[in-house]
Image (tube, grey):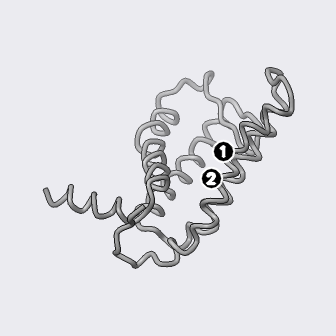
Amino acid sequence: MEFLNNLRTNFKLRPLWMNGLMLFCAFMTFIYLPWDVFIKPLAEDQEVWFGYMFTGWAAKAGAVLHWAVYGAGVIGFWKMKPWMFPWASLYTLQIAIGMFVWSYLSDRSESDFTGIVTAIPFLILAVALWRAKPRFNNAQSTEPENE
């Protein structure tokens, strides 16, 4: 029961959207990326960085990098580490740029508009993370979040 109380207390330290990001990072760290690195066949492996798709061994190396990034995200969000600013925002901005570039380079893309539409949610998230700087700077605070 104490574990659940500690879990509830920790989740109150940040707004709902940030808890969602933390849970996504946990999913990627503990479920998806171990499968991606150790089980997914090399011939099927694909990773996208900065909008460029990598396959084969380059994709496996990219998956290990993704694993490190998402693992850091879990720790950073869980403990509200000050180093999360600006890195969480900049990584999310890289995703937004990557979504646009990937859409632009993709043969399946209908227009540049597709890339803009797919990048917008990540741009909004990058701005929200940038504006959350005070939350990360006050990492020692134990006051629960009321949002």
Rounded to the nearest angstrom, the CA distance separating label 1 from label 2 is 6 Å
Q: Quadrant of residue 48?
A: top right
Q: Relative to residue 110, is residue 32 drawn left or right?
A: left
Q: Local crowd at mark 1 within 10 Å, few (<14), some, or many (≥20)? A: few
Label 1 sits on a secondary structure element that is helix
What residue type is disc 2 on?
Leu
Q: Local crowd at mark 2 within 10 Å, few (<14), some, or many (≥20)? A: some
Q: Which residue is mark 1?
A: 121
Q: Relative to residue 6, is residue 100 drawn left or right?
A: right
Report x, y in % for residue 141. Answer: 39, 78
Contact check, label 1 and label 2, Cβ < 8 Å: yes
In the image, 63 versus 144, the foreground residue is 144
What residue type is disc 1 on?
Pro
Label 2 sits on a secondary structure element that is helix
Image vertical order of residue 27 relative to residue 41, above or below:
below
Q: Which residue is mark 2?
A: 125
Image vertical order of residue 70 relative to residue 116, above or below:
below
Q: Pick out the residue farthest to the left.
A: 1
Say which quadrant the C terminus sits in.
bottom left
Q: Which residue is at 67% across, 52% downward?
A: 124
Q: Relative to residue 100, is residue 144 drawn left or right?
A: left
In the image, 75 versus 55, the foreground residue is 75
Image vertical order of residue 131 relative to residue 119, above or below:
below
Q: Which residue is at 68% across, 59% downward?
A: 90
Report x, y in % for residue 98. Answer: 75, 43
Q: Relative to residue 56, is residue 2 drawn left or right?
A: left
Image vertical order of residue 44 relative to residue 38, above or below:
above
Q: Which residue is at 66% across, 44% downward?
A: 121
